[in-house]
Amino acid sequence: MNGIEIEVKVALESARGFQLRLRRAGFRVLHRRVFERNTLFDADPPTLRPNGCILRLREMGPRCLITYKGKAIVTRTKTREEIEFETSDSKAAHMILMRLGYQPKFIYEKYRTEYTDGHGVVTLDETPIGWYSEIEGTEEWIDSTAALLGIDPQQFLTSSYGTLYLQWCERQGIEPGHMQFGPFSSFSRFAFTPR
């Protein structure tokens, strides 16, 4: 898929409450809850991140996506070029990226459920640093969906999960590593299964 991505993130206090608001607003599950492991690659020395670009390998169940994202234009929302394709072999994709000179730089994990109303996508993301939602569509759709879900535009976040993780580590006074679930994860796993 090639195109333009327009999105915002929102920090959530309650996953159950947000899920209920989605249902009441007429959203349906597009993709059921799945574990995602995202690996960001860059050259050594970095050539992508300094220019605001990313190269990502996303593993989610049996699916694997390779995504390039261009430099973001940040206003109330974040807009950037997105080029993406699916592959069936994540190990081969990982090896190809490394043979091309790209090295794994940052890993972030999450459990994601995607919802849609047929016009855009709203996610429910469980991460090691808390609950978040991404709202992706046109700017007009994002605004109307946020209003429908009771989200104030002042709650919009345009930061990446990498940046949110670094900010979280700073607040916690811990050394950043990768944003992964583990025995010392700061966030408990999903306590219910979204419908």
Image: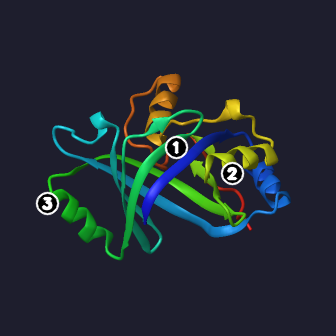
Q: Quadrant of residue 96?
A: bottom left
Image-based side of 117 in relation to 111, left or right:
right
**Closer to the camera in the image, 174 or 46:** 46
Where 129 falls versus 126 (above or below)? Answer: above
Position in image of residue 134 (x %, y %): 60, 49
Secondary structure category for the residue under label 3: helix
Whether residue 133 appears in this view of the structure is no
Distance of mark 3 from mark 1, alpha carbons? Answer: 32 Å
**What residue did someone put label 3 on?**
99
The colouring scheme, among rainbow, by chain, secondary structure or one colour, is rainbow
Neighbourhood count class around disc 2 (C-alpha, 10 Å): few under 14, some 14–19, many 20 upward? some
Secondary structure category for the residue under label 2: helix
Secondary structure category for the residue under label 1: loop
Q: Residue at x 14, y 52 (%)?
A: 101
Position in image of residue 98 (x %, y %): 18, 57
Image-based side of 35 in relation to 189, left or right:
left
Neighbourhood count class around disc 3 (C-alpha, 10 Å): few under 14, some 14–19, many 20 upward? few
**What residue did someone put label 2 on?**
141
Lower sequence index among marks 3 and 1: 3
Q: Quadrant of residue 146?
A: top right
**What residue did someone put label 1 on?**
185
Amino acid tagged 1: Ser
Amino acid tagged 2: Trp
Q: Which of the image's four quarters has the C terminus?
A: bottom right
Where 103 falls versus 162 (above or below)? Answer: below
Lower sequence index among marks 3 and 2: 3
Q: Residue at x 55, y 33 (%)?
A: 75
Distance of mark 2 from mark 1, alpha carbons? Answer: 35 Å
Q: Nearer the viewer, mark 3 or mark 2?
A: 2
Q: Nearer the viewer, mark 2 or mark 1?
A: 2
Position in image of residue 174 (x %, y %): 44, 27
Q: Residue at x 35, y 53 (%)?
A: 39
